[in-house]
Amino acid sequence: MIYLSPAAINEIERLKSKQPSNILFRLRVKSGGCADWFYDLAFDTTVQPQDQVLELQNLRVIIDPESLNYINELSLDYSEDLMGGGFRFHNPQATSTCSCGNSFSVSQ
């Protein structure tokens, strides 16, 4: 399961409101970044047959099965500080993270 804070949902909905009406929110993990993996938040119009579609507080979130292996139990938050706003990832599977907070490693 993935958890989204109310602040994260509000920000995703705000960004989504600037997109075409049929747009979907996709959360995935890609290889690379400062550590082994990085989080990728994007909008998409296509759901692949293997994708998981989660309904999280009236927000449809699309996640591919490979990414779900790395982000199960992820908590996603959004906050603003003096440097601006940004999403904050709290991943219990991450064994280390880089200082940017968007890249992580897991033990295999």
Image (cartoon, rainbow, N blue to C red):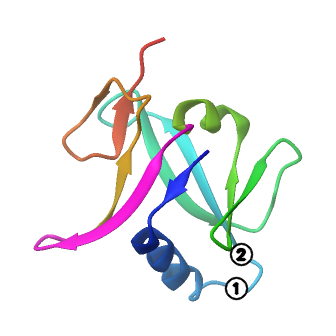
Residue at the spot 10% in from the left edge and 74% down from the top edge: 82
Which label is found at residue 23?
Answer: 2
In this picture, which residue range is highlighted in magenta? Answer: 72-85
Q: Quadrant of residue 105?
A: top left
Q: Which residue is mark 1?
A: 20
Q: Which mark is residue 32?
A: none
- Give above or below for 54 relative to 44: above
Q: Is residue 73 depicted above or below 9 in this figure?
A: above
* Residue type highlighted by circle 2: Ile
Q: Nearer the viewer, residue 39 or 1?
A: 1
Let me know if residue 74 is in the magenta part.
Answer: yes
Q: Are marks 2 and 1 in contact (CB under 8 Å)?
A: yes
Crowding near the residue tagged with mark 1, few <14, some 14–19, many ≥20 C-alpha atoms within 10 Å: few
Identify which amino acid the numbered label 1 is placed on: Pro
Q: Position of residue 19 (x, y in %)?
A: 62, 84
Quarter where residue 7 is shown? bottom left
